[in-house]
Amino acid sequence: MNLISTLHGRLIVGFALFQDTLAILLLPILAAQQTMFSFSLAGNLLLSFIVLASLAILLNRIVLPRLLKRFEKTKELFYLILLSCCFAFIYLSNFLNFSIVVGAFIGGLTLSALPYSREASSRITGLRDFFATIFFVSLGMQASLAFFGLPIAILILMLLVVYFLNPLIYFFISLASGLKSKSALFVGLALGQASEFSFILANQGFRLGQISPGLFSASILVITISMASTPYFMEHNDGIYSFLNKIGKHFFPAIYRTKFGEKEKRLEYLPKKPLEKHTVIIGTGVLGQQLVSALKETHHLVAVDHDSDVVQKLINKKLPIVYGEADNRELWQKIGLAKAKVLLLTIPDTNKVATVIRNAKKTNPEIVAIAKARNFKDALELYKSDADYVVLPEVIGSNVLLKHLTHFLETGHRHRISNLQNEFITYLKEKTKEENE
């Protein structure tokens, strides 16, 4: 889904990181409740945190890049360096009277900012899955039927906080920051859960005798249910939005007349001419930007993308573009999809592309729909969805390559390849310069 590059996806990551950081800071404070308001405790915590942060910066900027570059081809040593870094932070964190969770978190941040972070992530996938399994097994082992002794009102209250109050808070924060109701709801649904740090806090409270066994068991139950259900909420967020949107417009019409959404309004630059008989380009990656650049002078067009940075960059160049998801029905009205002449889709999500084509053809049978596919199976699927033409860039590229390679093998003349090389290098330099502007 490539959610991480969207505006609401980045908000989700930001909120999640803030939550985790706050939980990490609370762990050592809650462990020493008798002195939690003392200046000495605050000073020690601050000093310990500075030591950990300084070590993380030192390793990230100086030590680890050199070590990993030297041993990147030796899988065993590369793997050992990664593990040593994580366990070193865990040990040091415990030595400084922090929770080992703090050390693990800072160790992960140290590795995440390295140029080898993707390779590091792939190398420790098995270990990560193993520890995740241990984590959930420990959840199950510590759960009991003790929560049956709790008043049912407490369990209902906990579920309401997680499934209603928590998403509602993030929903309104996102609205206030300028997101539209749909994107704000996606943020709320994604964060409508009790994270693993909730379990760590509950476990610490149980060990210190601050919460009862029944409340601890109920906490485990709610945490587990919320973590398991969140992916399903995110998968069906469009249907949930449509349902809640109908209810909201009916019962709370005043909210829908507010001026929320100004930030997203700034993430659009629509042409002054009426949107009729125009070209709609959805997706402004390499192929999409090529199409926009080639057609902007001679054709009436509007582009769509869900990466806010790309949208802002094209707005700065005075190119007609709108921020949004391809399958957003409200967006279809804004870009005049029902009156468009040509629809070009360059996004990789085949399901979304098929949905847009089917709906565009339903409201505007004369529209010409052209889409990009990743493989032969997707291409056939898009043709079944009534696409007029499906492009497979790999096939086109291989045909061009085969043509020039065959000419060289048959004649021995290199001039075609050399000319193509010089022309393409010049083109790449121009595009790189545009990207940096």
Image (spheres, helix red, strand yellow):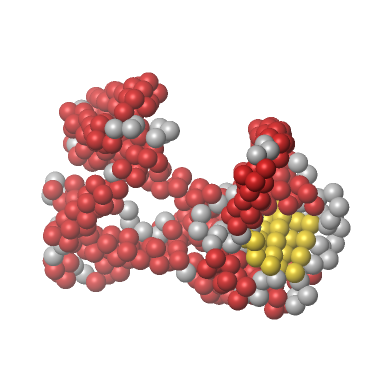
The image shows residue 344 at horizontal and vertical percentages of 70, 61
Residue occupying the point 69% across, 65% down: 370
In the image: residue 166, left or right of residue 81: right
Query: Can the viewer see residue 257?
Result: no
Toward the viewer: 324 or 11? 324
Look at the image and tell me in which quarter the C terminus lies.
Answer: top right
Toward the viewer: 429 or 324? 429
Residue occupying the point 62% across, 44% down: 409
Quadrant hosting residue 359? bottom right
Toward the viewer: 84 or 168? 84
In the image: residue 13, left or right of residue 418: left
* Up/down of 5 relative to 228, above or below: above
Residue occupying the point 41% across, 48% down: 16
Query: Can the viewer see residue 246?
Result: yes
The image shows residue 338 at horizontal and vertical percentages of 75, 71
* Up/down of 402 relative to 42, above or below: below
* Up/down of 288 relative to 30, above or below: below
Residue occupying the point 67% across, 58% down: 282
